[in-house]
Image (cartoon, coloured by chain):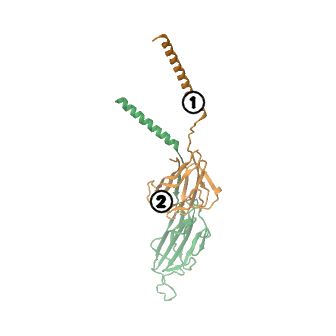
Chain colours: A green, B orange
């Protein structure tokens, strides 16, 4: 009985080897190298701060300059828009009521209200991680923005308890073939003291 | 039994033996002759397939390049920092180097979509598209809007004759659904299996 079992096992192994051998004869398979794709990202970090509490003319509203740092892993394009409003009225950067040092030019080019890094088609390399200073000073000019309480001249506006708002809009995208997307918005409200 | 009868019996036995020898010799001679004049040789055929993978050197990944821009790839291909709308182009050349015709199948094997923690992501494949041609075709007539998962038969030809060569072009397109949220994710095709099987 034991001898028969041994013969059976040996026969099965032999049969299996034969099948593998025959199969190997009639099938040939080759494989190629592995293909892997890893995704990249477009990321910018915004740093900076403003003063807190009520503000007065002549005071620099920016306590820490606002800077933008490129942490993208791919080449990208960047554009920035700053909207400054005083008493809910949008001001141009050259308005007499403010004194600012928006530091974007000449690295950035102003087109259609947006500052484009390197021009409309400019590309910011992923290896360029030097922080970009956007603004370090924003001062309300006391000659124009003043507390004229008691002044009956109707042309003068009483700016006490009014709001100054700075809004940064940052848009970035990979360098090619996609549309602009807003990375983030920074909205800062100030209230002018009396 | 008399002496004469005994003698005849001996003669008959001898004759019988001689006839037997002559008969055996003639039959053997026939076989021997037959063996020499009807040589039957069985030569075993073989199936051998050769596959060569090429990747297009297309720096701006726009899918526009020359055929001479294809480069042979013999080691793993790693494409880092993939972004939307990139087109990665490949060419696979397959040749039957054996002596028998065979049934050719080409399969993308073990297609994996992993998140940043290396766990499978069920939707990441939607960020990629697959375009491919018919064998020896020049236009990408097949287009999968979501990249297939697991295994995918991309081509079949039966038979592929000895010394016949076929070319498969395929593209991996990074779709618009790839966003910053996918940073660190990866997609891989473990191998492209090229199999040549004997026809039944």
Q: Position of residue A116 (x, y in %)?
A: 58, 70
Q: In this figure, what is the number of numbered marks?
A: 2
Q: Position of residue A149 (x, y in %)?
A: 46, 84
Quick check: can you spot residue A101? no
Report the quarter where the N terminus of chain B lies.
top left
Discs 2, 1 touching: Cβ within 8 Å: no
- Of residues B46 and A40, the one nearer the viewer is B46
- Of residues A150 and B22, the one nearer the viewer is B22
Q: Chain of mark 2?
A: B
User: Which is closer to the viewer, label 2 or label 1?
Assistant: 1
Figure quadrant of residue A120 = bottom right
Q: In the image, are marks 2 and 1 on the same chain?
A: yes
Q: Chain of mark 1?
A: B
Q: Position of residue B43 (x, y in %)?
A: 57, 39
Q: CA distance from mark 2 to mark 1?
A: 72 Å
- Secondary structure under badge 1? helix
Q: Position of residue B80 (x, y in %)?
A: 54, 56
Q: Of the two numbered discs 2 and 1 on the same chain, state the one appearing first in sequence.
A: 1
Report crowding for label 2: few under 14, some 14 to 19, many 20 or more residues within 10 A (C-alpha): many
- Of residues B7 and A103, the one nearer the viewer is B7
According to the picture, the residue beneath numbered tag 2 turns out to be B125
Identity of the residue furthest to the top in this view: B3
Above/below status of A12 relative to B118 = above
Above/below status of B27 relative to A150 = above
Above/below status of A121 relative to A1 = below
- Secondary structure under badge 2? helix
Quick check: can you spot residue A85? yes
According to the picture, the residue beneath numbered tag 1 turns out to be B30
């Amino acid at each position: 009985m034991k001898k028969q079992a041994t013969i059976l096992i040996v026969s099965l192994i032999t049969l299996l080897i034969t099948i593998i051998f025959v199969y190997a004869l009639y099938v040939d398979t080759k494989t190629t190298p592995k293909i892997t794709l890893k995704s990249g990202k477009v990321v910018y970090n915004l740093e900076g701060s403003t003063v807190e509490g009520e503000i007065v003319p002549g005071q620099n509203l920016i306590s820490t300059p606002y800077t933008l740092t490129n942490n993208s892993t791919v080449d990208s394009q960047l554009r920035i828009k700053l909207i400054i409003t005083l008493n809910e009225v949008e001001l141009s950067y050259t308005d007499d009521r403010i004194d600012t040092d928006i530091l974007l030019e000449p690295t950035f080019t102003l087109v259609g209200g947006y500052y484009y890094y390197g021009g409309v088609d400019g590309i910011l390399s992923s290896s360029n991680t030097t922080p970009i200073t956007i603004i370090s000073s924003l001062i309300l000019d006391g000659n124009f923005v003043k507390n004229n309480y008691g002044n009956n001249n109707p042309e003068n506006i009483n700016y006490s308890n009014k709001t100054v708002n700075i809004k940064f809009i940052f848009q970035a995208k990979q360098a090619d073939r996609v549309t602009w997307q807003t990375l983030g918005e920074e909205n800062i409200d100030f209230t002018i003291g009396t | 039994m008399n002496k004469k009868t005994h003698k005849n019996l001996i003669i008959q036995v001898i004759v019988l033996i001689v006839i037997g020898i002559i008969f055996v010799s003639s039959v053997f001679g026939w076989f021997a002759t037959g063996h020499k004049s009807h040589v039957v040789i069985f030569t075993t055929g073989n199936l051998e397939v050769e596959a060569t993978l090429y990747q297009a050197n297309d720096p701006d990944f726009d899918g526009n390049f020359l055929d001479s821009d294809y480069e042979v790839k013999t080691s793993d291909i790693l494409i880092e920092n993939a972004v939307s709308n990139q087109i990665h182009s490949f060419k696979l050349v397959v040749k039957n180097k054996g002596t028998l015709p065979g049934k050719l199948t080409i399969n993308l094997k073990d297609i994996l979509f992993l998140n940043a923690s290396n766990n499978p992501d069920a939707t990441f494949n939607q960020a990629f598209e697959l375009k491919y041609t018919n064998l020896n075709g020049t236009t990408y007539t097949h287009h999968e809007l979501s990249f297939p998962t697991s295994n995918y038969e991309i081509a079949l030809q039966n038979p592929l004759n000895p010394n016949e060569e076929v070319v498969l072009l395929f593209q991996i397109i990074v779709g618009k659904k790839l966003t910053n949220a996918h940073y660190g994710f990866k997609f891989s095709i473990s191998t492209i299996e090229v199999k040549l099987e004997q026809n039944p």
